[in-house]
Image (spheres, rainbow, N blue to C red):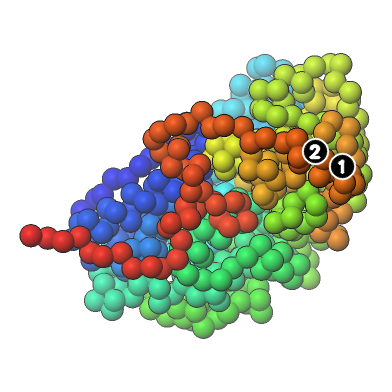
Amino acid sequence: MELPALSLGEVMVKPTTMLYRNMLAMEVEELLRSHPVDGVVILAGCDKTTPGTLMGAISMDIPTLFCPAGTMMSDRYLGAGKPAQVVGAGTHTRMFWDEYQAGRICDEEWVTLESHMTRSPGTCNVMGTASTMTLMVEAMGLSLPGAASLLAMDAAHVRMATDCGQRIVSMIWEDLRPSQMLTRGSFLNAVAVQMALGGSTNAAVHILALARRAGVSLSLADLDERGRKVPVVANLFPSGDRLMEDLHYAGGLPAVMNRIRSHLSLQEMTVTGQPLAAVIEGRESRDDEVIRPLEQPVSPHPALAVLRGNLAPEGAVIKPSAASPRYFRHRGRAIVFDSPQEMVKRCADPNLECTVDSVLVLRNAGPVGAPGMPEWGGLPIPHKLLQQGVRDLVRISDARMSGTHYGSCVLHVSPESAVGGPLALVEEGDEIELDVESRRLQLLVSDEELERRRARWQRAPSPYARGYVRLYQDHVTQAHEGCDFDFLQGQAPTPEPTIY
């Protein structure tokens, strides 16, 4: 029986699907609790549908198997007088858009490029949030081996879905539930995979939420520790230059995990009924340019680093593998935006006072403030600088950014500005220091001055007096805690509904 659930089309829902991830998780849990369901195959794959559905299934804890939606097909583009290049959704859209704004791509070529960037059904074919999350779920043992790299339009995807239907029946007879597979070791395996793939920064929020649902201890410090140890070996946009189709042909996730097996807990149970060691045994890379040897990583820099300092006492994240090394140690003056509308308007102003050393700051973009923590963290480069050839700046916010994005973006600043986090105290012209190697993010203002500013700060009243958003703002946790509802974390039992 198919049980439809809330649809979270990533580019359709305003202000962001992240606002409704927890609503989807609640719906899935209650759908499974209120119906006589013995086991479930989760059909999902986009950015929030994967963590949202699994959060609900983990809380329900019945036999669960995740069947990923599959990625879209790759394409090639041959521009006039240019070599053919691989084109994928998301990352290339942003790259070409910057060139279009700078006047280096004409209207006709832009329209042509759009027709190449999304050419089939499926999730984004770069290492964005969708593929990051489905591959991490496979790494945790909740999907069939190799499922997450299959293309949506591949006949093998239909066969994999059939295998899911057969396997879930056996899992029910075996009573193989998420609680028997989801351990601290399996979550650390997923984090190791995130780093090896050069995965999305959004995974930091989702994996913490999933771990808390499972009652497993996991923190930003664990993510940073794995980032320091596990190199980026998957040559995929935005850290590399290939797409998900290439990963599939190179051997998929089992080959990646076999390559980084020294960083994994191999005894963890999977939906196959076998431990991870048996699942990845003999799964070698078929293309060492796509799945690199450990000693030849895609980037010398990690896929994720966790920053702390007086601007982010509970942490912030950056993706060094997709950032500009010139900004790894940087000091610059802040240009502060209080809303995306102000940001867009000022960035389009040719008279905006900005240089390559400026630090763009966006606040009121976190879980409570936006609300929902939208993907506003890839702040636009001011038009004035785009014209000068600038393609990156240090950008700081309490927002998220798309997993397909790239650049020197500091994200998930916690606690957020809307609840009184230090980001609320930054003023135009303040100096900010970023040191990725030392994992520091510091506002260069004295403690005394910050206290004076804090005494003047007042929390803005919420315009939401009722409904789901009111509930969300009252109960959502901060980014370093996973942005789940405080009353849904943990494994406190919920009584079965009474049947008369």
* Residue at the extreme left of the image, as rendered: 500
What kind of element bears circle 1? helix
Q: Relative to 372, is 437 above or below?
A: below
Which residue appears at 84% of the width and 30% of the height? 428
Query: Type of residue at label 2?
Result: Arg
Q: Report the residue at 86% width, 16% height from top.
A: 351
Q: Nearer the viewer, residue 267 or 398?
A: 398
What amino acid is at disc 1?
Answer: Glu
**Where is residue 135 shown, x and y percent of the image?**
53, 60
For residue 165, which quarter of the picture?
bottom left
Q: Residue furthest bottom?
A: 267
Gap in Å between the C-alphas at discs 1 and 2? Answer: 6 Å
Q: Position of residue 155 (x, y in %)?
A: 39, 52
Query: Is 42 above or below relative to 108?
Result: below
Residue drawn at (70%, 22%) of the image: 342
Residue 232 visible in the picture: yes
The residue where tag 1 is placed is 449
Q: Quadrant of the C terminus?
A: bottom left
Q: Residues within 10 Å of mark 1 (few under 14, many from 20)?
A: few
Q: Tag 2, which secondary structure?
A: helix
Q: Does residue 322 appear in the picture of this structure?
A: no
Q: Mark 2 highlights which residue?
A: 453
- What is the quadrant of residue 388 in the picture? top right
Rendered image: mark on residue 231? none
| Residue that appears at 80% across and 55% down | 309
Query: Within 10 angstroms of label 2, few (less than 14), some, or many (20 or more) residues?
Result: some
Do tag 1 and tag 2 residues touch (Cβ < 8 Å)?
Answer: yes
Q: Is residue 453 left or right of residue 261?
A: right
Q: Position of residue 469 (x, y in %)?
A: 45, 37
